[in-house]
Image: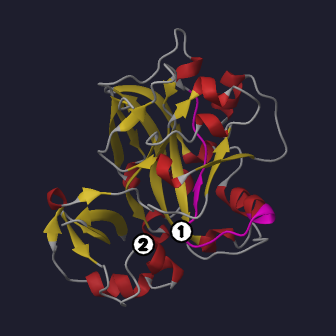
Amino acid sequence: MKLLSFIRLGKSSFGAVVNDGVIDLTGKLDPDVNSIKDLISLDMQDQAEEYIAGKSKDFSLSDISLLPVIPDPQKIMCVGLNYMEHKKETGRPDVDNPTIFTRFADSQVAHLQPMIKPDKSERFDYEAEMAIIIGKGGRFISESESMKHIAGYACYNDGSIRDYQRHTSQYTPGKTFPGTGGFGPFMVTPDEVGDYTKLPIELRLNGNVMQKATLADLIFPIPRLISYISEFTALSAGDVIVTGTPGGVGDKRTPAVYMVPGDVVEVDIGMLGILKNPIIAAPKI
């Protein structure tokens, strides 16, 4: 099942993708189920699959404006330096535990929405990543049980403002400018994905391949990430873990390549779809 969040007729909604359209699930299963986060919080995915079985679309994708897959996650936990080629290009040493930083919900934009280059920097970089969406929350989750806590997978572009990222040893200022992270187009449930390590991941900037790897290349695999993060914070339904980017980031190229207004960037993770965003300049304040 593929689930997405959207706005239609001024109302925030969610639904299931079927062929070229959407079946609206807002309030259809339960009056209190009005978002993907509600659905997975109440563990009603099976009911959603039964509801959409045999139904045709309520409307076309062209009739809606997409939102980030989870517009309002309680937590967005991002993982740095989680592909060997990226770690090598940064010159960072091996570590025993994942590098974790955070994003804020207002830093996210949806598929086809513009990512915004801040006027404070000329070093707006791309990062193709796979996001996992937590279904069943918990604390001190074991690696052996961790995959049972996943509601789905999605594409993510962890856009980075490189100079702000390096003002100090803490990443957060370079990762939370409004409108700098793409999240979409939809979430795919684990039963459709199967073995996530077989997924390819590729980023294209204006049609040129800049990053290319597979999810098998993660240094710290998903079970380790979920288990480790749940040691220091309780995970909740709808939380997002962004799992890291492959080598080939623009900042480490010679000469460096940064995103500028007019560019188009795509994150392609096979069956998870293609997340596409144009780049625009920040509005003048």
Judged from the image, the secondary structure of the residue bearing numbered disc 1 is: loop
Which residue appears at 36% of the width and 50% of the height? 110
Which residue appears at 44% of the width and 50% of the height? 155
In x, y percent, where is residue 84? 68, 33
Q: Is residue 166 left or right of residue 252?
A: right
In x, y percent, where is residue 263? 32, 26
Which residue appears at 74% of the width and 36% of the height? 170
Q: Is residue 179 left or right of residue 206?
A: right
Q: Say how the picture is coloured.
A: secondary structure
Estimate the spatial distance between the alpha carbons at disc 1 and disc 2, rounded to whole Å: 8 Å
Q: Is residue 111 left or right of residue 103?
A: left
Judged from the image, the secondary structure of the residue bearing numbered disc 2 is: helix
Asked whether disc 1 touches disc 2, contact meaning CB atoms under 8 Å apart, the reply is: yes
In x, y percent, where is residue 76? 59, 55
Amino acid, disc 1? Gly
Residue 36 disc label: 2
List the single residue furthest toward the front: 285
Q: Is residue 131 magenta?
A: no
In x, y percent, where is residue 264? 32, 31
Above or below, 100 relative to 46: above
Which residue appears at 39% of the width and 38% of the height? 115
- Classified by dominant secondary structure, the portion drawn in magenta counts as loop
205 vs 19, nearest the viewer: 205
List the single residue furthest toward the top: 255
The boundaries of the magenta stretch are: 230-247
Amino acid, disc 2? Ile
